[in-house]
Amino acid sequence: MRLITALLSLFYPRICPMCEEYIGEGQVPGTLCKTCLAQLPRTEQAETPENLTEMTLTGSDSVMVRDTGQNMVRTKKVMHLERAAAFLFFDKEDPIRDLVHVLKYADRPEIGYQLGRQAAMEFQYADFFDGIDVIVPLPLHPKRLRERGYNQSEYIARGISDVTGIPVDTTHVERIKNTPKQALQKGAERKANVQNAFAVNHPEQMYRKHILVVDDLITTGETMRSCLKAMRRFRGAKFSVFALCKAR
Ligand SMILES: [Zn+2]
């Protein structure tokens, strides 16, 4: 670890990416200082069932069906999740926005690892990881992965794994459709773009597992829902979701 820290300090100054203050020698270069880490806008969702993240994923997927009187009625098509929570709230005006941007696009995956670790240490107290067999980071399309060099969700997942001891799996789910950047799209367009974007491999190996799916940011939840839909081929599996951030 010491060698890695020494190498990192060649590339990254010991400066916190949020407040730009100097961070101590005991910390991995390029990570958040202790003050910023303590001040991040936590959601407290780990101990709150039916929180905003869970409701975004399970509650809004309504469909039109014919009732017994042949009238069209809107009904909830409920996707069941064991648990779902985000660690932080994401607001457009907040410094967290820049942090997520840096994590995704500025070649700073170690921030994801640090925040995954921090979230896991706090969520453990709410028994959030109880019974989970495997952690699956939301995959990037291979083309996007090549451009970016890393999957930020995988770094978050590895941080969680480091604290909880739950293994990370990156082989059973893949992204088969390279979708445009979501920020540029409207709701319906976004939904169409992520449909059938994911595929699974060797579903029999995930039989009856409790899987924690990890993403960096949940906005409308369309991408996560599309991924969970593909994962229905894992027979008898149960699903929970962890997001680093939930947009409000
Ligand atoms: Zn700081």
Image (cartoon, rainbow, N blue to C red):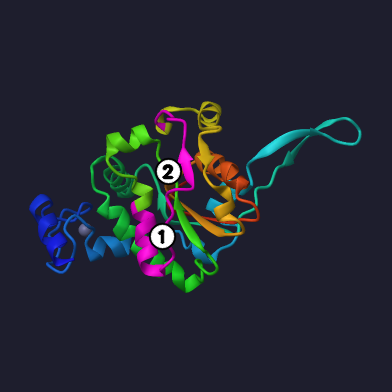
Q: Is any part of residue 40 visible from this angle?
A: no
Coordinates of residue 112 in the picture (x, y in percent): 32, 53
Q: Is residue 95 left or right of residue 120?
A: left
Q: Is any part of residue 32 visible from this angle?
A: yes
Q: CA distance from mark 1 to mark 2?
A: 25 Å
Q: Residue at x 11, y 56 (%)?
A: 7
- Helix, strand or loop at disc 1? loop
Q: Is residue 176 above or below residue 50?
A: above
Q: Which residue is mark 2?
A: 139
Coordinates of residue 222 in the picture (x, y in percent): 53, 38
- Helix, strand or loop at disc 2? loop
Q: Residue at x 32, y 49 (%)?
A: 96
**The residue positioned farthest toward the left in the image shown:** 10
Residue type at mark 2?
Answer: Pro
Q: Is residue 119 left or right of residue 127?
A: left
The numbered mark at residue 42 is 1
Q: From which residue to which does the magenta span run? A: 155-181
User: Which numbered disc, 1 or 2, marks the residue that appears first in the sequence?
Assistant: 1
Tell me which image quadrant ligand 1 sits in: bottom left
Q: Name the quadrant containing residue 123.
A: bottom left
Mark 1 CB within 8 Å of ligand 1? no
Q: Residue at x 49, y 28 (%)?
A: 186
- Nearest the viewer among 6 and 181 is 6
